[in-house]
Amino acid sequence: MSHHKILILDFGSQVTQLIARRVREAHVYCEVHPCDVSEEWVRSYAADGNLKGVILSGSHASVYEETTDNAPDVVFQLGIPVLGICYGMQTMAQQLGGKVESGQTREFGYAEVRAHGHTAFLKDIADFTTTEGHGMLKVWMSHGDKVTELPAGFKVMASTPSCPIAGMADETRKFYAVQFHPEVTHTVQGQAMLNRFVLDICGAKPDWVMRDHVAEAVELIRQQVGDEEVILGLSGGVDSSVAAALIHRAIGDQLTCVFVDHGLLRLNEGDLVMDMFVGKLHAKVIRVDASELFLGKLAGVSDPEAKRKIIGGLFVDVFKEQAAKLKAGGGGHKGATFLAQGTIYPDVIESGGAKSKKAVTIKSHHNVGGLPEQLGLKLLEPLRDLFKDEVRELGVALGLPHEMVYRHPFPGPGLGVRILGEVKKEYADLLRRADAIFIEELHNFKDESTGKTWYELTSQAFTVFLPVKSVGVMGDGRTYEYVVALRAVQTSDFMTADWAELPYALLKKVSGRIINEVRGINRVTMDVSSKPPATIEWE
């Protein structure tokens, strides 16, 4: 099935992928590609007639520098709508005959923008109206340069006192541009603006729906794999779980999952994974207990990045050993030729950006890089077109339990990075139990105003082990035991996060239970740092 599509050209902004997420939320298919694609590539991409619009992203660069990227001129010649965002607006202005200059006043953060000219882009979209009757928008700015002269055919679409051209439009050619960022949640009407562009102005069909995607994806997997066998490294996380369920739906017993238990999982997590995939989905899963191997290699290591590297490297070694056996065949099977990975679209964007040196990446992905080549296997990535929220929708459509699909992210290194300093079995066992109590009580506590549990109201929550001892009193005796910290954040994109203001009654309950039930912990603290600046090691 072919879908209408929107092309997003990436000039290196850290939030470019948020544009794609917003477009996908409008149920329109889109792709992010580097801004320096060739004109031939663009024409080829548009040749099937499904390309309905182009969006030019932001950037940290200045358009008037010689080394700076422009959009391929062909995007303005295709006869389809174009939207420029921030730097995208500046390069549109410059390329079409306008002027961009360094501004006297830099604008970073909240701004109120006045809409002008009743353009199709902003018609009836406003956050409030001034006493003079001007429609105003609450937006997020992030720029030093600004457009100072409009290109021919354009009119002002929005302004602020310090940025007279904060938006421009050529309605004849359906070219629109804004100096602010509609893709970030700080711009209140951002989703409405992007919906207006892709659905109304571009006329793209909102036919990108996960329920329908299952059948498409199953068919594609069957075409790619045929009668071959597939290996997948199952971590228990959302991405690998949904990939496993989808591939199993497509090819059944041609799939074998390898589940490496590194001893740093949450309480009973290994059993839960096996119950789901073997017990309910009837998939073939090889469970490898490698906890002693991992804990042995981590002994004496306290640096968080060193721990990550050890855990990631060992996982690859253990997985390779199992994959080699499966690849060899025998025992009733002919041997695997495909390696499946739960790579999702942000990982593709980021690794692509890293290769082109265009994108400024702010998170690294944990996929097993380079394994297909090392093992001599072909690669199967059935989720590579999807964002996290789409993967979750797909998981529900496949019949996976809601609580599994929507559970909080848990990084590959697991408890290894949530134990500060050296990883010891004693610490992992204490942390596992404390963490389980925290998660249980988040499920138990409902917020009366929303009717949701605090587990649903937080995006990520866990307990962190602090390798320090504190004095406490239990009855008539003094104790000298370890300390744990509770961490809970709220976020929409996991790039930025605020700490969750959990109710005191919940904190009191969690603290009391941990201290009473987990012998070896006598103090509970709360982490109240936001991200950034606290992009801390355990997330």
Image (cartoon, rainbow, N blue to C red):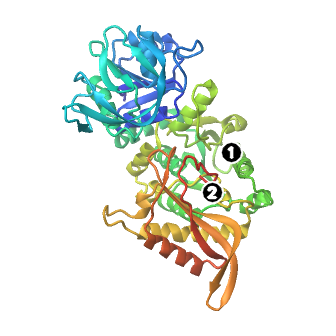
Q: Position of residue 384 (x, y in %)?
A: 51, 36
- Front position in the image: 337 or 479: 479
Q: Is residue 147 above or below residue 538?
A: above
| Residue 26, visible in the rendered structure | no
Query: Is residue 4 in view from this perspective?
Result: yes
Q: Few, some or many C-alpha atoms within 10 Å of disc 1 (few <14, some 14-19, many ≥20)?
A: few
Tell me the CA gap for discs 1 and 2.
32 Å
Image coordinates for residue 196, horizontal then vertical, percent: 28, 30
Q: Report which quarter residue 470 is drawn in.
A: bottom right
Q: Relative to residue 452, is residue 187 depicted above or below?
A: above
> CB of mark 1 within 8 Å of CB of mark 2?
no
State the residue position of label 1.
329
User: What is the three-letter code of the residue carrying label 2?
Assistant: Gly
Secondary structure at badge 2 equals: helix
Q: Residues within 10 Å of mark 2 (few under 14, many from 20)?
A: some
Which of the two discs, 1 and 2, sits closer to the camera? 2
Residue that appears at 58% across and 81% down:
516
Secondary structure under badge 1? loop
Residue 497 x/y as whole percent: 49, 49
> Compared to 29, does 435 lie above or below?
below
Taking the image as shown, residue 399 lies to the left or right of residue 512, namely left
Kindly identify the amino acid type of the residue bearing the numbered disc 1.
Answer: Gly
- Quick one: 223 or 131, which is closer to the camera? 131
Q: Which mark is residue 363?
A: none
Nearer-N-terminus badge (1/2)? 1
Residue that appears at 26% across and 27% down: 200
Front position in the image: 48 or 386: 386
Q: Mark 2 points at which residue?
A: 414
Q: Quadrant of residue 28?
A: top left
Residue occupying the point 51% across, 36% down = 345
Using the image as rendered, state which of residue 307 and residue 189 is in the foreground. Answer: 189
Say which quadrant the N terminus sits in.
Answer: top left
